[in-house]
Image: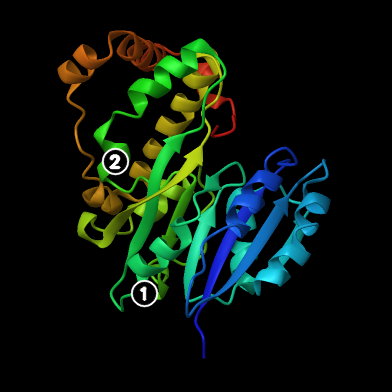
Amino acid sequence: MIPVFSVLIPARNEARHIGPCLNALLASDPVPGVAVEVIVIANGCTDDTVARARRFAPIAEQRGWLLKVIDRAQGSKPGALDAGERIARGVLRAYLDADVTVSPDLLPALVTALDTPAARYASGTPQIAPPESLFTRLYARMWQRVPFLREAAPGFGLYAVNASGRARWQEFPDIIADDIFVRLQFRPDERVQVAAAYRWPLVEGFGNLVRVRRRQDRGVAQIRARYPQLMANDQTPRAPLMALMRADPLGFAAYAAVALAVRLGRPHDRDAWVRGR
């Protein structure tokens, strides 16, 4: 029997992004010896995300892929992932944010990386989608230089596991950072970052970057408090700050300004919910 690769896409009010996401995914290079199913899980949508996603079913069928769209009333990303997994058939599974676009060679590279009986986690090489605002361009310029993005299979926006890897947790917990939770289920030697790229957007402007960074820090703190045993796998490469500053002083200044604002943030800001992008 041909193994199945399930790609799960949780989507909440992603009418603007679901089309480009599915277009890029369905333009992937062939994945020999593997059947692909794509599961879009709309959760709490008040726009036409569901209708737009369903328009891609004929394109998927032409490729020999299966596209399923689930419409859930609840607006929970962990709940959406669990709902998708209940109908997923794949022994290999990828979890893709609806605002991410993959390169054509990414799916085949993930399948190759996961082709082992040992537990394995894989992700692509993230690239920042071209920002619109000057401040975000400067911030992105520095962020793209951080070793974590190039060496540690960070997995934000996209991560994948094989069957042995997926067995390491049960349902997705109700937490902020599902990507960090999954990544830390694996030792560094069990994580693979393939060269194939995917594009991930940053939010625009100083204030939005601060709010997103603050939420990311809350997500890490939440995992540290609930699952302290996972932190042994958090071997993040340290950024060479002086080298980064010399390489791009303006980018470093933007990056440092966001980090400082996060540290000095007002308590009520920490309770605000914001999109990852």
- Provide the residue designation for mark 2: 150
Residue 63 coordinates in the image, percent (x, y): 65, 70
| Res. 64 in view | yes
Q: Are marks 1 and 2 in contact (CB under 8 Å)?
A: no
- Mark 2: few/some/many CA within 10 Å (<14, 14-19, 20+): some
The reply, left or right, for residue 57 in relation to residue 135 is right
The reply, left or right, for residue 153 in relation to residue 197 is left
Amino acid of disc 2:
Arg
Residue 215 coordinates in the image, percent (x, y): 48, 30
Amino acid of disc 1:
Ser
Q: Quadrant of residue 236?
A: top left
Q: Residue at x 21, y 50 (%)?
A: 232
Q: In the rendered image of this protein, does residue 269 appear above or below residue 112?
A: above
Q: Quadrant of residue 190?
A: bottom left
Distance in Å between CA atoms under marks 1 and 2 = 25 Å
The reply, left or right, for residue 86 in relation to residue 107 is right
- Provide the residue designation for mark 1: 164
- Mark 1 vs mark 2, foreground winner is 2
Q: Residue at x 40, y 48 (%)?
A: 155
Q: In the rendered image of this protein, does residue 101 appear above or below residue 65?
A: above
Between 255 and 3, which is closer to the camera in this rendering?
Answer: 3
Residue 262 coordinates in the image, percent (x, y): 41, 17
Q: Residue at x 47, y 76 (%)?
A: 32
Between 226 and 13, which is closer to the camera in this rendering?
Answer: 13
Residue 240 coordinates in the image, percent (x, y): 17, 25
Quadrant occupied by the C terminus: top right
- Mark 1: few/some/many CA within 10 Å (<14, 14-19, 20+): some
Label 1: element kind: helix
Label 2: element kind: helix
| Res. 81 in view | no
The reply, left or right, for residue 46 in relation to residue 74 is right
Q: Disc 1 or 2, which lies upstream in sequence?
A: 2
